[in-house]
């Protein structure tokens, strides 16, 4: 996981976003336009951060914009992002004829035309964290991702990679923000987890800065998470085990945030040192916060069956899934993400997980 200075999407002491912040009036929005030098589907890349259709920290607007809130190192912020394909470059004029002996060469067309596979990303941000959100925008959208080594031999994955050329693995660099919802999703159906997330953010989150869509909230700070009383967890439908895991993580937030700069194995080790965090939760966090394209969600209720059905035509367990993904080492999460996007699922004949409501207990 490279960490060279000056990489796109990394926080720095200066840069255009910081200069804009110093020049802007207090509370004024900041804006940035970034030309991604690759095909980019903004909605698809950012959709992994969405926790249900009513997520208070994420909105997909009718005009195509994505709204997202975050608690940055500088404070709360709201981000609005759109992406459009850049216009195709004009055809280059015919090359000038070679000069006659003794004559000077005549300047002609540019040596190389612009790459047509360019996405123009326009972003606006509000709040104390606005400059940080704009500086880290390229990383959030996959500028640090390197899919070059992903050359699937399986025809389905090859076709899916072609169809979803704009699917990148981005990184939010906000670890606790990825960890809390992952813990809420442990061993429960999505409806339960998303309901708890919505209740907790609405109750304890800050209002989103700027003209965000109604109801949007910012992820609470670590101190707030660590002080949520037991009855509030119960009202949100979160039992004591998951609540204790989140509280312990919030109390260790400083060390947890450090994993964004760690190698994958070290990040996994530190995450799994937390009580209540296993391989599934660690992978879900590293996929989103660290942009780890190899993090496999081992222990997922549906993923092994889906991968087995898509790649081998049969339902497999975790061990079978890892065997099927072995040829894609370094890109195993990328492969599973493409399987998810394919929509291929085995027939559901087994028992479904029941929706529980701990608030009634």
Image (tube, rainbow, N blue to C red):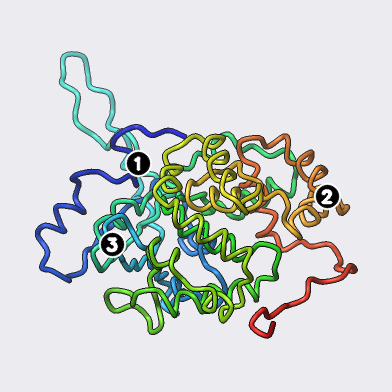
From where the camera sits, is residue 26 visible? yes
Tell me the quadrant of the picture where the C terminus can be found. bottom right
Q: Which tag is nearer the camera, tag 1 or tag 2?
A: 2
For label 2, the crowd category at 10 Å Cα-Cα, with few meaning under 14, some 14 to 19 and many 20 or more, is some
From where the camera sits, is residue 141 visible? no
Judge whether 173 appears above or below 110 on screen: below
Residue depicted at x 62% and y 54%: 276
Q: Secondary structure at mark 3?
A: strand
Q: Secondary structure at mark 2?
A: loop
For label 1, the crowd category at 10 Å Cα-Cα, with few meaning under 14, some 14 to 19 and many 20 or more, is few
Counting residues from the N terminus, which is met first, the one under dot 1 or under dot 2?
A: 1
In space, the residues marked 3 and 1 are separated at their CA atoms by 42 Å
Counting residues from the N terminus, which is met first, the one under dot 3 or under dot 2?
A: 3
Q: Position of residue 286 (x, y in %)?
A: 54, 48
Q: Is residue 80 left or right of residue 354?
A: left
Residue located beneath label 3 in the image? 75
Counting residues from the N terminus, which is met first, the one under dot 3 or under dot 1?
A: 3
Residue located beneath label 1 in the image? 113
Q: Position of residue 163 (x, y in %)?
A: 61, 55
Instruction: Report the disc number at residue 317.
Output: 2
Q: Secondary structure at mark 1?
A: loop
In space, the residues marked 3 and 2 are separated at their CA atoms by 42 Å
């Amino acid at each position: 996981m490279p960490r060279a200075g000056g990489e796109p999407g990394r926080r720095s002491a200066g840069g255009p976003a910081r200069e804009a912040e110093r020049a802007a009036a207090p509370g004024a929005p900041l804006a940035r336009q970034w030309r991604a030098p690759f095909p980019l589907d903004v909605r698809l890349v950012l959709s992994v951060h969405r926790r249900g259709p009513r997520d208070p920290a994420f909105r997909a607007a009718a005009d195509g914009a994505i709204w997202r809130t975050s608690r940055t190192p500088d404070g709360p912020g709201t981000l609005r992002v759109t992406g459009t394909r850049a216009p195709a470059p004009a055809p280059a004029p015919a090359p000038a004829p070679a000069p006659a002996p003794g004559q000077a060469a005549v300047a002609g067309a540019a040596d190389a035309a612009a790459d047509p596979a360019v996405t123009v990303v326009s972003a606006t941000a509000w709040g104390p964290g606005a400059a940080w959100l704009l500086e880290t925008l390229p990383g959030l959208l996959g500028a640090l991702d390197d899919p070059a080594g992903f050359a699937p031999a399986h025809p389905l994955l090859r076709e899916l990679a072609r169809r979803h050329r704009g699917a990148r693995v981005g990184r939010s660099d906000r670890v606790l923000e990825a960890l809390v919802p992952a813990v809420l999703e442990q061993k429960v159906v999505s409806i339960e987890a998303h309901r708890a997330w919505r209740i907790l953010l609405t109750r304890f989150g800050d209002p989103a800065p700027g003209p965000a869509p109604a109801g949007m909230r910012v992820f609470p700070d670590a101190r707030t998470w660590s002080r949520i009383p037991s009855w509030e967890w119960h009202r949100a439908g979160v039992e004591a085990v998951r609540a204790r895991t989140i509280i312990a993580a919030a109390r260790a937030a400083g060390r947890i945030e450090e994993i964004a700069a760690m190698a994958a194995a070290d990040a996994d080790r530190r995450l799994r040192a937390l009580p209540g965090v296993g391989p599934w939760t660690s992978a879900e966090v590293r996929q989103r916060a660290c942009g780890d394209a190899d993090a496999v969600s081992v222990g997922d209720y549906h993923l092994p069956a889906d991968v087995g059905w898509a790649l081998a035509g049969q339902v497999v367990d975790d061990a079978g899934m890892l065997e099927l993904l072995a040829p894609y080492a370094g890109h195993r999460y990328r492969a599973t993400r493409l399987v998810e996007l394919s929509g291929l699922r085995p027939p559901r004949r087994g028992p479904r997980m029941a929706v529980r409501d701990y608030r009634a207990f």
